[in-house]
């Protein structure tokens, strides 16, 4: 009996993978993301983003310093390459936290309609009246800024949104025969939610995961730019823009431009991947 | 109840009208509940997070008696329920308590900041709504072509780029490179309305990028659905000119869902302006919340956050009303 779904989904899954690999948007997104993941993994061993050289501060781009240098004479190319690391650790962890908490909450809400669902729905509605950024900003004010608190703040801010998606997915599964069968077998509520329903709502959760990852990168970068996210001396892109922003009036454009382009390329790559996945899972 | 030969049909439409009306009333009550819950959350956050308010204002070295006296003066030595009821009953009357940082009422600051944010948002919306709808309709009419793909992919990519990233690039390009626009959003004091709008143009562009994709996507989906529908086919088959088909049948139905998206984005936008306002040094509600959060000015923070939530709930409610009023299937209900 456990073989039947596997036999059915095997060729379908392969078909989906092949469809994904032949989608140009998905492949371009994947290539850019893999480039930045590569930089995040080995970047720090190839370049030193923290080596300062006060004699050579604020140099424009040249053959020696491709992206110029910043106020402390640190090489901007090294900092842009190494700047991919923290955001690619913090954003995925925040996303996973939000997906796990949101899925748990959504399963409970979808499975226990009535009082529990009503109360939690009102609470979620109230929280969702605030923009994600304001929620994270207020949470970080309370928690203090560090890599760990950024993960918690964004994860918690994602929870209600994920819960809403999972809740409606559970609602449409609840009345299907396999759930009724499990109930008749006398399975516990936890067993039915986790073993029976959860595997069947994985596709919408996967799409939610990629969409949330895009938002997480967006939000981590923005919080760092506002000074309440990642902290110095991290070469993080958003933080670098926040530190160097005051300089651009003086014409030192290279201290912010390459970081801005790096953030742009990363969020667009995640978006292209999400778009491709969404198309393949539909 | 009306009795007529077509009683069955009238009964049905009457039942539909009452159900639409009761939906709207239910919707209104739920909005009030949402606001109530939000106010409790905001208050709990603002009062519990700082711990001892007097201590956090006066610092760790202050005398115990001075801290107690300040707590008594601010009313923060009372029970939380009493404090909440006091706070919210004043809030609904427009009195948003006193700022820790400025030692003066919060309301005028919040009011001025909200007005500034609304101006910035208005400029962005006046640009992006027609642009987004035009882009979406064009993409739908040329479905599957290169034009469609370019509009869709550019729109979606622009949507995910943080405002400060596109803002920085715009400042470098138009503010510093070409010197077309000022680098700040705040016009010099005493300048006219047009100068004010001119100063708001560059800051509104990142918001236009952010919203274009959403609006165009909804407009495209709506138009495609309307183009494929039976009523469009009927209109074409009965010999109506193509332009009239588009205007009367396709656009009217296609743009309904777009209203909802525009409204929910507008609601979020008021609070989400914090980045643009910081980047362009503009005194709006976002930068007010940001400054209050960083300065631990909790009365200011609570008032700002609650006002942002209030605006969101009000705008989405208005959108639902507009949707009901414009939807031909529900139109009777509001007459």
Image: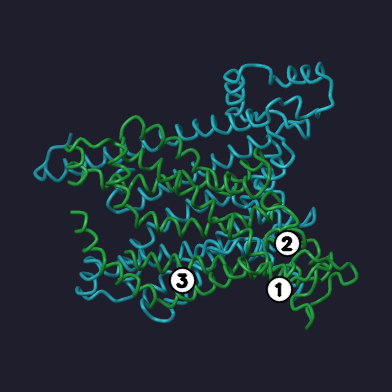
Residue drawn at 58 percent across, 42 percent down: B308
Give the CA distance from mark 3 to mark 2. Answer: 35 Å
Q: Do labels 1 and 2 share a chain?
A: no
Residue farthest along the bottom direction in this orientation: A63
User: The N terminus of chain A appears in which quarter of the rendering?
Assistant: bottom left
Per the rendering, the mark at residue B173 is 1
Q: Where is residue A102 in the image (x, y as percent from the top left)?
A: 44, 45
The hue in which chain A appears in the rendered picture of the protein: green
Q: In this view, does B171 lie above or below B143?
A: above
Quadrant of the image occupied by residue A72: bottom right
Which chain is tinted cyan? B
Q: Nearer the viewer, residue B67 or A69?
A: A69
Q: Do labels 3 and 2 share a chain?
A: no
Residue at image mark 3 = B135
Binning the other alpha carbons within 10 Å of mark 1 as few (below 14), some (14 to 19) or many (20 upward) gives: some
Q: Do labels 1 and 3 share a chain?
A: yes
Binning the other alpha carbons within 10 Å of mark 3 as few (below 14), some (14 to 19) or many (20 upward) gives: many
Numbered disc 3: secondary structure? helix
Please indicate, yes or no, whether residue B318 appears anywhere in the rendered image: no
Numbered disc 2: secondary structure? helix
Residue at image mark 2 = A240
Of tags 1 and 2, the one toward the viewer is: 2
Quadrant of the image occupied by residue A75: bottom right
Q: In this view, does A206 lie above or below B7?
A: below
Quadrant of the image occupied by residue B238: bottom left
Give the CA distance from mark 1 to mark 2. Answer: 19 Å
């Amino acid at each position: 009996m456990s073989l039947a779904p596997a036999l059915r989904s095997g060729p379908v899954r392969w078909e989906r993978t092949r469809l994904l690999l032949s989608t140009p948007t998905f492949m371009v997104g994947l290539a850019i993301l893999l480039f930045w993941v590569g930089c995040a993994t080995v970047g720090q061993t190839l370049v030193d983003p923290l080596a300062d050289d006060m004699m050579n501060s604020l140099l424009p781009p040249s053959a020696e310093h491709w992206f110029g240098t910043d106020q402390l004479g640190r090489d901007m190319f090294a900092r842009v390459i190494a700047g991919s690391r923290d955001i690619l650790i913090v954003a995925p962890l925040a996303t996973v936290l939000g997906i796990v908490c949101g899925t748990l909450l959504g399963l409970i809400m979808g499975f226990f309609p009535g009082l529990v669902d009503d109360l939690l729905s009102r609470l979620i509605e109230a929280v969702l009246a605030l923009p994600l950024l304001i929620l994270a900003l207020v949470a970080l004010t309370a928690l203090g800024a560090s890599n760990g608190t950024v993960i918690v703040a964004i994860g918690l801010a994602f929870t209600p949104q994920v819960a809403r998606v999972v809740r409606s997915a559970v609602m449409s599964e609840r009345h299907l025969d396999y759930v009724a069968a499990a109930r008749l077998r006398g399975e516990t509520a936890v067993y039915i939610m986790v073993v029976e329903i959860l595997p069947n709502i994985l596709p919408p959760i996967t799409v939610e995961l990629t969409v949330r990852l895009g938002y997480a990168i967006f939000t981590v970068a923005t919080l760092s730019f506002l000074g309440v996210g990642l902290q110095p001396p991290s070469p993080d892109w958003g933080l670098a823009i926040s530190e160097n922003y005051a300089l651009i009036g003086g014409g030192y454009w290279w201290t912010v431009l390459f970081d801005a382009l790096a953030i742009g390329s990363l969020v667009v790559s995640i978006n292209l991947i999400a778009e491709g996945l969404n198309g393949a899972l539909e | 109840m009306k009795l007529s030969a077509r009683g069955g049909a009238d009964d049905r439409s009457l039942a539909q009208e009452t159900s639409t009306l009761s939906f709207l009333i239910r919707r209104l009550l739920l909005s009030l509940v949402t606001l109530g819950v939000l106010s409790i959350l905001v208050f709990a956050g603002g009062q519990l997070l700082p711990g001892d308010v007097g201590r956090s204002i006066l610092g760790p070295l202050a005398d115990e008696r001075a801290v107690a006296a300040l707590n008594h003066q601010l009313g923060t030595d009372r029970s939380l329920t009493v404090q909440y009821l006091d706070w919210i009953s004043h809030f609904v009357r427009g009195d948003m308590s006193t700022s820790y940082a400025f030692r003066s009422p919060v309301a005028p600051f919040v009011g001025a900041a909200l007005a500034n944010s609304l101006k910035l948002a208005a400029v962005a919306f006046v640009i992006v709504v027609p642009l987004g709808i035009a882009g979406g309709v064009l993409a739908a009419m040329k479905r599957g072509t290169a034009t469609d793909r370019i509009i869709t992919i550019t729109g979606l990519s622009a949507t995910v780029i943080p405002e400060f990233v596109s803002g920085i690039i715009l400042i470098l390009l138009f503010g510093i490179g070409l010197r077309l626009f000022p680098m700040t959003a705040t016009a010099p004091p005493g300048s006219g309305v047009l100068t004010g709008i001119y100063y708001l143009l560059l800051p509104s562009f990142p918001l236009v990028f952010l919203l274009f994709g959403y609006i165009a996507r909804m407009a495209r989906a709506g138009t495609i659905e309307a183009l494929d529908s039976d009523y469009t086919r009927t209109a074409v088959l009965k010999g109506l000119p193509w332009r009239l088909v588009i205007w009367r049948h396709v656009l009217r139905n296609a743009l309904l869902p777009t209203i909802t998206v525009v409204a929910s984005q507008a609601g979020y936008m008021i609070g989400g302006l914090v980045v643009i306002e910081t980047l362009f040094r503009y005194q709006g509600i976002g930068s007010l919340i940001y400054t209050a959060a960083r300065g631990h000015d909790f009365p200011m923070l609570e008032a700002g956050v609650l006002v942002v939530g209030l605006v969101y709930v009000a705008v989405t409610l208005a959108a639902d009303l507009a949707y009901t009023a414009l939807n031909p299937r529900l139109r009777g209900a509001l007459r």
